[in-house]
Amino acid sequence: MINNKNIFLIEDDINLLSGLQAKLRVEGFGVTADEGAEENAVLEKILTLKPDYIILDIVLPKINGLELLKKIKAKPEISRIPIFVFTDISDRDSRERARKYGADFYLIKTDFNLDEFINKFKKIIANKEKIGAI
């Protein structure tokens, strides 16, 4: 049941943000986007919207994405929302910290074009829903 799922997208690259938002909407997802300018505002939106999934860039101009990830996972009312980290950071330490802080998936932007990312995202969701993990 991929359709009718809501995604909260946190990305500061306006071109990537717009592209992801448009493609996800075409695929039937509801999308709320934020450029990640203010941590408390982002957290408040997530708490209010309680999206089905979060796509999070960890390199943001005014927010440490890993710290935001940790704060999301520390709040019981939103801690179970699956988080897809989608970033340019590919080093092992960042991957390990993201997993430690609760990231469900860690995907590198340079490994995907937009269509490939959307297909991977949908496939992960479909597979997890089949086994009841999401």
Image: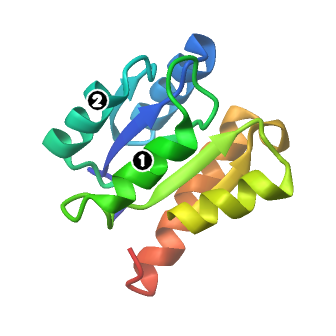
**Residue type at tag 1:** Ile
Look at 48% across and 76% down and name the residue there: 128
Alpha carbon separation for disc pair 1 and 2: 16 Å
Residue 66 located left or right of residue 32: right
Along the line of sight, which residue is nearer the eye, 111 or 12? Answer: 12
Q: Residue 46's quadrant in the figure?
A: top left
Q: Quadrant of the C terminus?
A: bottom left
Residue 127 located left or right of residue 111: left
The mark closer to the camera, 1 or 2, is 2
As displayed, is residue 19 above or below residue 116? Answer: above
Look at 83% across and 37% down and name the residue there: 110
Q: Position of residue 104 (x, y in %)?
A: 54, 65
Q: Residues within 10 Å of mark 2 (few under 14, many from 20)?
A: few
Tell me if label 1 and label 2 are in contact, CB under 8 Å: no
- Residue under numbered circle 2: 40
- Residue under numbered circle 1: 54
Q: Where is residue 51 in the image (x, y as percent from the top left)?
A: 27, 48
Q: Position of residue 60 (x, y in %)?
A: 58, 24
The mark total stands at: 2
**Residue type at tag 2:** Asn
Rendered image coloring scheme: rainbow
Q: Please, what secondary structure does the residue beneath circle 2 have?
A: helix
Q: In which quarter of the image is the N terminus?
A: bottom left
Look at 61% across and 13% down and name the residue there: 15
As displayed, is residue 31 above or below residue 75? Answer: above
Look at 78% across and 40% down and name the residue there: 89
Question: Nearer the N terminus, badge 1 or badge 2?
Answer: 2
Q: Is residue 31 visible?
A: yes
Tag shown at residue 97:
none
Q: Please, what secondary structure does the residue beneath circle 1 have?
A: strand
